Image (cartoon, rainbow, N blue to C red):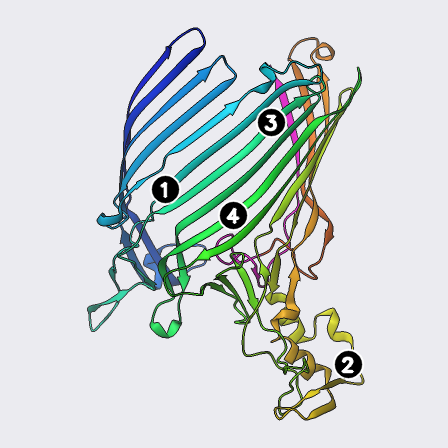
């Protein structure tokens, strides 16, 4: 159930000043009943009946969530060129412990349309804006207390078990505070548009499930991450490059760069484990003073002089400590879109790009170990010469088989960590439009389009894998293993306007 009560007032205080006021309340109640049946050992193919299974189990989950809210806003306008908007909202959520379950998020924004005073032939519209906002959020159900369930039986008696996630009865709501300054310009008789923004955003008490040692009997723990700061700039430029009776070319380009830093973690923590590769050689961590979602890997084991320390079999070996290879979240992203129209023929394409991130490839690690990586071709006939020092620091030089050498290198995960930079032809569309006149006005027009998406990379640095591949878009972003290539899609669209 989602119910709102709303009061809205709009008035002109004078000829030059107007205002609007809104106040209200909201009640959100979520009730779910989730029935899950697992069955294995089905007796007959294509007959998906749990009754025909050798092993089956059933489970019912009833998550509930209530959020009560009050909110209000005030808008002021002066001569249609100066505007102020202020809002405030307070929520009380049932998924946060009672002592912390109230959270407030105000905002205030101001804008000045300076083109109303600055009358020039080259400026059609110009606006400056500044704003501050705070946003709050709660957690999913079942994050604050330990819950039991039954699974299976012994001698006819049900077996109780607990989940693999450690709850947090001190959980606090998420808060995001953001300050932004920007401008919007329309120039040259509306042929050029520019939008520039600078922002600084702080995320406080982010609610995450950090990984814990499996020896604890659990896999994850619900925690609040202290403070993560983002600061950056966004620029978007669009315009009409060419325009005539039979030809038109519209183009737009955008770029955004973000500097991210983990400022605080939970009390006493210097890093937080977020995810682990299935090879156990790559990890995602939050680390103090560094960008979040660091890809942590193993370099070669070396002495203080930089010499490689070999093991007793004269194989290279991985270091004992993890090395930060870089963030898995690209700090620089953007795209370039173009639209061409020549008579009834239209062509549109989008190129996008991401720069500054890295990805650890479990696929390439396994390829090193199995001799399937291109780098493993070297030394197959004659062996590989290895130089370094032993555990005592004495110089060592020997030749070992390529299989042993590259098998050892498969554990040095820095070698399988690559730049995730790419430039990609994201989409391409070719269309033809038939005007109403040619159709004797039976319909207003017909457009036939051939569309392709995820077509190919113009540039990438990851061998054998897609640079956008990962376990998930959550905490495992930056870890790849046995991923499939991204799927290209093609389509034929028919649009008939009546």
User: Circle 1 sits in a helix, a strand or a loop, which is it?
Assistant: strand
- Residue 230, labelled with which disc? 4
Q: Which residue is mark 3?
A: 184
Which tag is nearer the camera, tag 3 or tag 1? 3
x and y, in percent, of residue 95 in the image:
28, 48
Q: CA distance from mark 4 to mark 2?
A: 48 Å
Q: How many marks?
A: 4
Q: Can residue 277 be found in the magenta stretch?
A: no
Front tag of 3 and 2: 3
Which residue matches tag 1? 136
The mark that comes first in sequence, 2 or 1, is 1
Q: Earlier in the sequence, mark 3 or mark 4?
A: 3
Compared to residue 20, the image places residue 140 above or below, namely below
Q: The C terminus appears in which quarter of the rendering?
A: top right
Image spot of residue 386 (x, y percent): 73, 85
Q: What is the x, y in percent for residue 35?
A: 30, 50
Q: Is residue 180 above or below residue 486?
A: above
Circle 1/circle 4 CB separation < 8 Å: no
SS under mark 2: loop
Q: Which residues are magenta?
A: 470-498
Question: Disc 3 or 1, which lies upstream in sequence?
Answer: 1
Tell me the element at label 4: strand
**Looking at the image, is mark 4 or mark 2 earlier in the sequence?**
4
Q: Which residue is mark 2?
A: 380
Rendering coords of residue 329 (x, y %): 57, 53
**Residue visible at 63% across and 16% down in the picture:** 118
Q: Secondary structure at mark 3?
A: strand
Q: Which of the 4 image quadrants contains residue 176?
A: top left
């Amino acid at each position: 159930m989602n119910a709102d009560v709303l009061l809205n007032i709009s008035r002109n205080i004078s000829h030059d000043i107007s205002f609007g006021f809104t106040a209200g309340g909201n009640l959100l109640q979520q009730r779910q009943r989730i029935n899950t049946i697992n069955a294995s050992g089905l007796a007959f193919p294509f007959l998906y009946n749990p009754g025909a299974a050798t092993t089956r189990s059933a489970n019912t989950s009833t998550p509930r969530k209530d959020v009560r809210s009050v909110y209000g806003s005030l808008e002021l306008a002066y001569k249609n060129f100066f505007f102020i908007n202020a809002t405030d909202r307070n929520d009380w959520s049932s998924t946060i412990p009672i002592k912390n379950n109230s959270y407030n998020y105000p905002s205030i924004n101001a804008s000045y349309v300076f083109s109303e005073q600055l009358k020039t032939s080259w400026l059609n519209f110009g606006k400056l804006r500044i704003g501050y906002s705070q946003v709050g959020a709660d957690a999913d159900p079942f994050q604050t207390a330990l819950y039991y369930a039954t699974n299976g039986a012994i001698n006819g008696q049900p077996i109780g078990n607990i989940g693999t996630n450690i709850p947090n009865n001190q959980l606090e709501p998420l808060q995001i505070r953001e300050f932004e300054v920007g401008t919007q310009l329309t120039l040259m008789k509306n042929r050029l548009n520019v939008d520039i923004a600078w922002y600084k955003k702080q995320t406080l008490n982010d609610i995450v499930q950090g990984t814990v040692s499996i020896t604890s009997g659990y896999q994850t723990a619900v925690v609040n991450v202290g403070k993560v700061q983002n600061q950056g700039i966004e620029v978007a430029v669009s315009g009409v490059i060419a325009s005539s009776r039979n030809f038109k070319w519209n183009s737009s380009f955008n770029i955004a760069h973000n500097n991210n830093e983990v400022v605080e973690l939970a009390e006493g923590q210097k890093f937080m484990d977020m995810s682990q590769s299935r090879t156990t050689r790559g990890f995602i961590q939050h680390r103090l003073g560094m960008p979040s979602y660091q890809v942590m890997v193993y370099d070669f084991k070396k002495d203080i002089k930089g010499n490689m320390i070999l093991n007793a079999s004269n194989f290279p070996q991985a270091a004992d400590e993890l090395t930060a290879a870089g963030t898995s979240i690209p700090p620089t992203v953007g795209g370039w879109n173009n639209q061409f129209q020549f008579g009834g023929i239209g062509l549109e394409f989008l190129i996008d790009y991401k720069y500054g991130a890295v990805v650890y490839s479990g696929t390439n690690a396994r390829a090193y170990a199995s001799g399937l990586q291109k780098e493993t071709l070297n030394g197959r006939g004659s062996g590989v010469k290895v130089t370094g020092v032993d555990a005592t620091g004495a110089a060592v030089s020997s030749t070992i088989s390529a299989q042993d050498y590259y098998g050892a290198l498969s554990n040095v995960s820095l070698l399988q960590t690559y730049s995730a930079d790419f430039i990609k032809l994201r989409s391409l569309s070719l269309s033809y439009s038939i005007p109403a006149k040619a159709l004797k006005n039976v319909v207003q027009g017909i457009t036939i389009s051939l569309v392709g998406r995820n077509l190919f990379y113009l540039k990438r640095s990851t061998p054998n894998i897609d640079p956008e591949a990962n376990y998930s878009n959550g905490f495992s972003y930056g870890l790849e293993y046995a991923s499939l290539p991204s799927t290209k899609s093609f389509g034929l669209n028919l649009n008939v306007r009546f």
